[in-house]
Amino acid sequence: MTVSPCRANFFVYNKELYEFLLAVQENCRQNHCRQIVSISVEIDYVDPLIVLEQLNQANEINFYFENRGKKEAIAAIDAVAKLEIADKERFIIAENFIKDCLKNIINFGSTNLPFSRAHFFCCFSFFEKNAQLDYPFPAATIFLPRWQVAVKNERCILVANTIINKSVNIHKLLHNLCEQVEKIQSLEANTINIDYSRRKYSKKTLPNPEKFKLSVLSALSKIRANHLSKVVLADVLDVKSSHEFNLVQSLNNLRQLHPNCYVFSTSNGKGQNFIGASPERLISIHKKQLITDALAGSAPRGKTPTEDAANADRLLNSEKERHEHSLVIDFITQRLSELGLLPQMLSPRLRQLSNIQHLWTPISAIVPANVHPLKIVAQLHPTPAVAGAARDIACAEILRHESFERGLYAAPLGWVDSDGNCEFIVGIRSALIDGDRARLYAGAGIVAGSDPDKELAEIQLKLQALLKALV
Ligand SMILES: C=C(O[C@@H]1C=C(C(=O)O)C=C[C@H]1O)C(=O)O
């Protein structure tokens, strides 16, 4: 725990901040502009998930990200700047929006801490245009939160972003900031209680498994005819519960059940949330060092250590699984090279999750200063891990077979900061939550040699792991 003499009253009694804000306001008056001040401060430890639970309002946008293995969690609540993009050019529009916002941001406070300063939270849909007109998330959403509470290695960093213009009452603004900080700090001792007894669903299995298997057979015939080498086909499970889903409890379950995954949630501020626990990192960039995961090829975990080891061995040595995996590696390395990066591959390994294991090859590269993280996201999404190869043909097959909107499923979701650091994951093992209804998504890569029954079993396995966590 870090000790600071006037932690709770940091904002009100911090004369330096008061004077800083007055100076910013004076500048706004003189230049007829408005600016965003990003205030970073270390606070006593508080669980960001509890902050999300306590601070979030139903009509406010939010974002939650946690990776227990990396000892990281972030809650981002409400927006001081937000952009929604309906279709084409969304990555470049998002990049320009972030760059424009950054021109107007002035930092104050402890700006060298992890997760200090402005972070932009983004979610994109799988396709650049949603076919379902009333799908609740647009093709891209980017926002700078009003409140950001992050934990890294048990240190807790709060970032408050606030708009200063010529007419804002600085004294009142400081008072409100202080009240909110005190509220956050008072959550220090809160924990999340889980009540499983209320969980009752209408359905627990796919409504039409035969249709999925027919799609696999059709894809296999196209693969045999050399139209494509891989397509990732998904299906959905629609669940109605006897009560409204509890977002925070579900996220708490997800982080306990999948401690080595990226647990995520984002709300559109209109009542719908997209949540999940993804094992797949699209890109992370830290101090110009990029890492991306080639993740494809799967086997169930065994019920005993011997069975588990046998499954793992089969996975590592299966020609079919390795082919499926290598398509992803080839695509990623080629796409990164096209941007002028020099990708380095580590040896293939296993990514073992609670219920399933995957072939996994981390790929690293140094990012040149002129390449924005969203350029790389745009260049990689969708990889053959979630679309197929060749990509455009695979995407056309997906649209032909899947009768539901993918929306945020299997799409990039993450944050980017002012220094080009970022973390984007692929939104798989995910569900769209709307009151007492949830739509769960899961897919499987189809390549030559795929067996429709096994692919169906794989998506059932993925769906059940998610269903288990929803309360
Ligand atoms: C598409 C999904 O997962 C992808 C498909 C995999 C496979 O078929 O082996 C493995 C990991 C993911 O890249 C999903 O979980 O929905």
Image (spheres, helix red, strand yellow):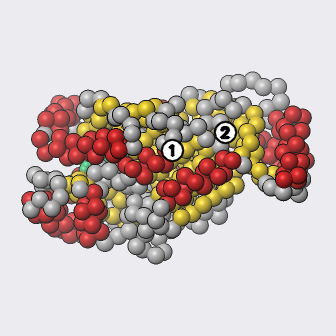
Res. 186 mark:
none
| Relative depth, front residue between 215 and 439 | 215
Q: Residue at x 27, y 57 (%)?
A: 391
**Image check: 313 left or right of 332?**
left
Using the image, determine if residue 94 lies above or below residue 187.
Answer: below
Is residue 8 among what the camera can see?
A: yes
* Quarter of the figure with the N terminus: top right
Disc 2 residue type (three-letter): Arg
**Image check: 314 left or right of 437?**
left
Residue with the mark numbered 2: 117
Place of residue 322 in the rendered image (x, y in percent of width and height, measured from the top left): 17, 41
Is residue 232 among what the camera can see?
A: no
Place of residue 188 in the rendered image (x, y in percent of width and height, measured from the top left): 68, 37
Location of residue 97 (image quadrant): bottom right
Residue with the mark numbered 1: 372
Using the image, determine if residue 347 lies above or below residue 463.
Answer: above
Mark 1 or 2: in front is 1
Disc 1 residue type (three-letter): His
Q: Residue at x 10, y 52 (%)?
A: 449
- Element on which disc 2 rests: loop
Compare marks 1 and 2 and give the one earlier in the sequence: 2
Location of residue 43 (image quadrant): top right
- Element on which disc 1 rests: loop
Mark 2 neighbour class, 10 Å CA radius: few under 14, some 14 to 19, many 20 or more: many
Count the labels in the image.
2
Q: Residue at x 21, y 38 (%)?
A: 302
Place of residue 470 in the rendered image (x, y in percent of width and height, measured from the top left): 44, 54
| Relative depth, front residue between 4 and 17 | 17
